[in-house]
């Protein structure tokens, strides 16, 4: 280990669908957070760890900043607040648009109120070459004084090497918190549940994806070459259960096929994926149901 070693926690925050999960996966070099073009895909704080000879950067991917509307949204807001309390650096992501919507306003208020060390990453510059010019003419502009701003494309990787270099420069000297081969603090079961949920987001539109929660109940080895995974997909209504299963179970089979491919890559073996669909009525508005699904707000 070199004489000077830097380490610290970096909270990645911003409005929904600004590219936080895509960026963390890019920086860590492996898919850890699920991604979707639909907003509010990330529900939990998810850690990604990047270790090199000079530093260890511990990224915390967070749900999108938005105004909470139900118990699930309250949980997501709590996950943001909890993550930010422990960070050494806030990586605030934004994209420049001509019109600020409700989520932009919530994100802007968050930026205005945060007093800790902040690095601004303007994302999606591959689709907006005028981002730098537009930034300081936008409502964000007046809150960027004394805050370093970088322009990136998390999708293509543009500017991400400079971003990593800047983050490393801003981190304090510190110990290596995790072994070199650590990529995340999340369990295998959690990642499998997220993979299944990601495939559901890709298959369904409107309200159905947001009504889905996934619990992986069992992961075991049947033979050295074959694994077994049992997971339950929870929805809020009987009608959603029917949509998820589809005619003669074809929709659920399609979802399972897509998820199994990625789960097999994760586990490095063939997998029998045993998927079930159950109804937990209005779980997003029920604190007890949220707790049963592993989304409890810790006091």
Image (tube, rainbow, N blue to C red):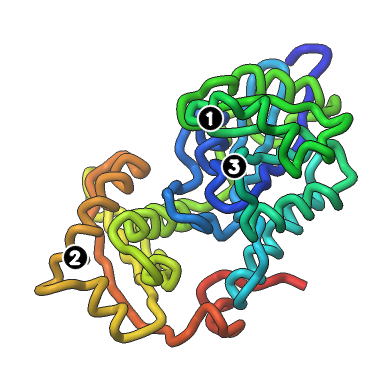
Label 1 CA crowd tier, 10 Å (few <14, some 14–19, many 20+): some
Label 3 close to label 1 by CB (< 8 Å): no
Describe residue 258's horizontal placement relative to residue 84 as left or right. left
Label 2 close to label 1 by CB (< 8 Å): no
Q: Nearer the viewer, mark 2 or mark 3?
A: 3
Describe residue 121's horizontal placement relative to residue 275 as left or right. right
Q: Nearer the viewer, mark 2 or mark 1?
A: 1
* x and y, in percent, of residue 132 in the image: 66, 26
Q: Secondary structure at mark 2?
A: helix
Look at 72% across and 70% down and name the residue there: 298
Query: Which is more toward the observer, 216 or 38?
Result: 38
Q: Which residue is mark 1?
A: 128
43, above or below 212, in the image: above
Q: Which residue is mark 3?
A: 97
Q: Secondary structure at mark 3?
A: loop
Looking at the image, tell me whether mark 3 or mark 1 is earlier in sequence order: 3
Q: Which residue is mark 2?
A: 251
């Amino acid at each position: 280990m070199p004489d000077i070693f830097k380490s610290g926690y970096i909270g990645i925050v911003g409005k929904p669908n600004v590219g936080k999960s895509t960026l963390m996966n890019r920086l860590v070099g492996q898919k850890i957070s699920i991604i979707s073009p639909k907003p509010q895909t990330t529900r939990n704080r998810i850690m990604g760890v990047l270790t090199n000879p000079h530093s260890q950067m511990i990224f915390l991917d967070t749900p999108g900043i938005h105004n909470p509307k139900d118990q699930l949204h309250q949980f997501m807001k709590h996950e943001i607040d909890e993550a930010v309390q422990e960070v050494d650096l806030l990586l605030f992501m934004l994209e420049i648009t001509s019109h600020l919507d409700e989520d932009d306003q919530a994100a802007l208020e968050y930026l205005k109120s945060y007093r800790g060390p902040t690095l601004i990453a303007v994302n999606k510059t591959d689709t907006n070459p005028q981002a730098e010019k537009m930034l300081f003419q936008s409502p964000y502009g007046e809150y960027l004084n004394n805050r370093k701003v970088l322009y990136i494309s998390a999708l293509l990787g543009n500017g991400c090497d400079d971003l990593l270099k800047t983050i490393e420069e801003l981190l304090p000297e510190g110990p290596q918190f995790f072994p070199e081969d650590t990529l995340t603090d999340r369990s295998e079961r959690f990642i499998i549940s997220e993979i299944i949920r990601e495939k559901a987001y890709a298959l369904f539109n409107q309200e159905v994806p947001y009504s889905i929660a996934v619990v992986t109940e069992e992961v075991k080895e049947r033979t050295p070459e074959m694994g077994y995974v049992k997971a339950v997909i929870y929805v809020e209504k009987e009608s959603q259960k029917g949509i998820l299963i589809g005619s003669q179970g074809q929709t659920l089979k399609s979802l399972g096929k897509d998820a199994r491919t990625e789960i097999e890559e994760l586990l490095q073996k063939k997998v029998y994926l045993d998927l079930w669909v159950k109804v937990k009525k209005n779980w997003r508005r029920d604190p007890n149901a949220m707790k049963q699904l592993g989304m409890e707000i810790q006091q």
